[in-house]
Image (tube, coloured by chain):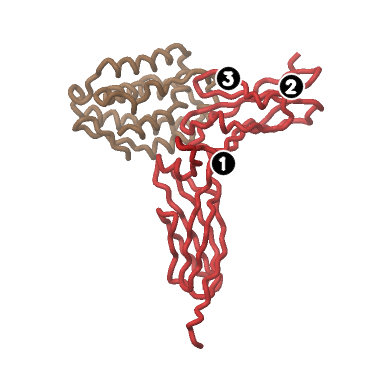
Amino acid sequence: LKRLHFGHCVVSVDMYEIRKGFGEIKEMTQAQDQYTSIRLLHRSYSLPDTKTEDRCCFFHYLLEFYLANVFNQCQIYSNFHQRRVSRIANNFLTVKKELNLCDTVTTCPCGKEAIHRYEQILSRFERMDSHSAALKALGELDILLEWIDKTE
Amino acid sequence: AERSPLIQQATFWSTNFENIFTWDHGRETSPGTVYDVQYKTYGAVWQNKSECQNITQHFCNLTRETESYTERYYARVRAVVPDCCVSKWIKSLRFCPKEDTVVGEPEVKYIPNIRSIKFIIQPPYTPLRDEDNQTLTVEDIFSQFDVIRYQIIIFCENTQQKWKKTENNKEFEISELDPGTEYNGTIHIKYLGKISKPRKFRVKTLPDNLWMP
């Protein structure tokens, strides 16, 4: 488990389970991503480099983004892969519930930086057709996990 | 017209962060076929690998171009058959050196004593260097992300005894062995939930000359 500390709020992320699930969909998602000149989770606006006070909000946005725009948008035809995506999605739901238990108003203030960074991701996402964009975001889960890993 | 002399299995082969882009030619290669290679950082644009334009071999060393080991990369290759045609670009899967490199077997020094053997492990070197231009080992790199461990499996054919130990240090001693006895086994490096290639060894403890029959 990776514990993320946002003020007095602690959120646990089951990195092992998510990584395991991603390891089994990685090749499928990344091989189908034909837009290799587009990267959604760009290192110039990564989570670990976000100002401490904005990190919780940005993290919250990322969770919402994946839950709302990625996991349910992906048309994945194989049951094998669909089950892995569902398992990852459930993991994200658990993290989101934990985060919501924190008093997000005080714990997760949304400053300009968090909003700007999230808008960067969303604007790139929305420039693509929804299926390709969702597939790309899914194939970038390893980047998101790396961000979470690096976030102190 | 574009006829595609088939290129297959365009992929990165990486050991100890030496990153080689390789490909197979599907059918008999027409004489004079040459290959062009390009590479990119994921999210950026394609670039020619200058040393791998119009080449006849089926590999291209992209170690220098993929030095940032947490970055993600692609490479692609096309075949050019003189007076005929140019194939499509055949792309690799997304490649992340830190995730995809394989760690080779470590070097090991053994110092046998009468009832113990001391092991001194040297993790493989990589082509990468630090700011002081010192060559980095795989341990230098992976220890930034995880605890590196050394797993030793040691076996005695005489007694059919077998030990398996995991150590955090590169120097450790296995004791309570029998004098003048041969032991063999393997040593692996464990990193990021993965395991390196095994270093096999065969060592004999020193005889106990003090022992009087």
Residue B6 percent coordinates (x, y): 72, 26
Q: Mark 1 belongs to which subunit?
A: B
Q: Viewed as shown, does residue B58 lie left or right of A51?
A: right
Report the residue marked by disc 3. B46
**What amino acid type should be assigned to the residue bearing mark 1?**
Thr
Q: Viewed as shown, does residue B38 lie left or right of A87?
A: right
Mark with earlier residue (2, 1): 1
- CA gap, disc 2 and disc 3: 18 Å
Q: Mark 2 belongs to which subunit?
A: B
**What amino acid type should be assigned to the residue bearing mark 2?**
Val
Report the residue marked by disc 2. B80
- CA gap, disc 3 and disc 1: 24 Å
Q: Secondary structure at mark 1?
A: strand
User: What shade has chain A been given?
Assistant: brown
- Residue at screen point 64% across, 30% down: B10
Labels 2 and 3 touching (C-beta < 8 A): no
Residue A35 percent coordinates (x, y): 53, 18
Quadrant of res A69: top left
Mark 1 is surrounded, within 10 Å at the Cα level, by few (under 14), some (14 to 19) or many (20 or more) other residues, namely some
Q: Secondary structure at mark 2?
A: strand
Report the residue marked by disc 1. B15
Using the rendered image, report if marks 2 and 1 lie on a common chain.
yes
- Chain that the image shows in red: B
Mark 2 is surrounded, within 10 Å at the Cα level, by few (under 14), some (14 to 19) or many (20 or more) other residues, namely many
Mark with earlier residue (2, 3): 3
Q: Is residue A40 above or below residue B158?
A: above
